[in-house]
Image: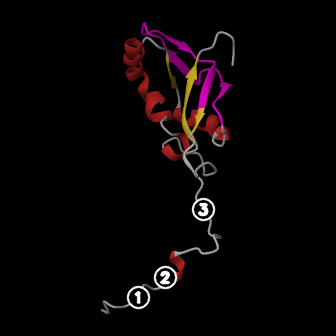
Amino acid sequence: MNLYQFAPNISNWIDPLGLSKCEDPCTDPVNPKSSKQFGHTFTQHGAQKKNNLKGRAASTRQEQGYWTNNNDAAQFLSPYRNIDKVTTVPIPDGLGEVVLPDGSVKKANCAIIVPDKKPPKGNCLKTAYPIYSKNGC
């Protein structure tokens, strides 16, 4: 064993011309577990969070939206991973629900999608959550 041997190929460690492929989570295959793609969309507003959101809705007296199926929601949200401003969009029937402050639940008809603005290439979305809007999206 030669403890003084150089690394096998140190030129692979750098990219002086900037030609190597950069990872871009916004164009990667959809993964609802990826916080780089979806921020806290599913950790805070995912299907498994309904009971937590009941408590939050009661304590804040504000409606709290959650996705009923994380995989379906991720597929739906994937075209919006490169947006540059907060966007409200209609969602398919049954994809989201909203917990009201009294603990009751109603179907969501829209979603608010919030991009992440971390420079230079932050995450794709900061969050996205279902809402109910009387006037549409």
Q: Which mark is residue 22?
A: 3
Tell me: residue 13, above or below residue 31.
below
Name the residue at the top extreme: 102
Tell me: residue 7, above or below residue 110.
below
- Badge 1 or badge 3: first in the primary sequence: 1
| Type of amino acid under label 1 | Phe
Q: Residue at x 42, y 84 (%)?
A: 7
Quarter of the image where one finds residue 53: top left
Identify residue for label 2. Answer: 10
Specify whether 7 is left or right of 116: left
Tell me: residue 79, above or below residue 7.
above
Mark 2 residue crowding within 10 angstroms, few (<14) / some (14–19) / many (20+): few
Q: Which mark is residue 6?
A: 1
Q: Which mark is residue 102?
A: none
Q: Can you give x and y, in whole percent of width and height, for residue 86 in the image? A: 63, 31
Magenta-highlighted residues: 85-113
Mark 3 residue crowding within 10 angstroms, few (<14) / some (14–19) / many (20+): few
Say whether marks 2 and 1 touch (CB < 8 Å): yes
The one nearer the camera, 118 or 30, is: 118
Q: Secondary structure at mark 2?
A: helix
Task: Give the image's coloring scheme.
Answer: secondary structure
Residue 6 visible in the snapshot: yes
- Badge 3 or badge 2: first in the primary sequence: 2
Q: CA distance from mark 1 to mark 3?
A: 27 Å
Position of the N terminus, as image quadrant, is bottom left
Q: CA distance from mark 2 to mark 1?
A: 8 Å
| Type of amino acid under label 3 | Cys
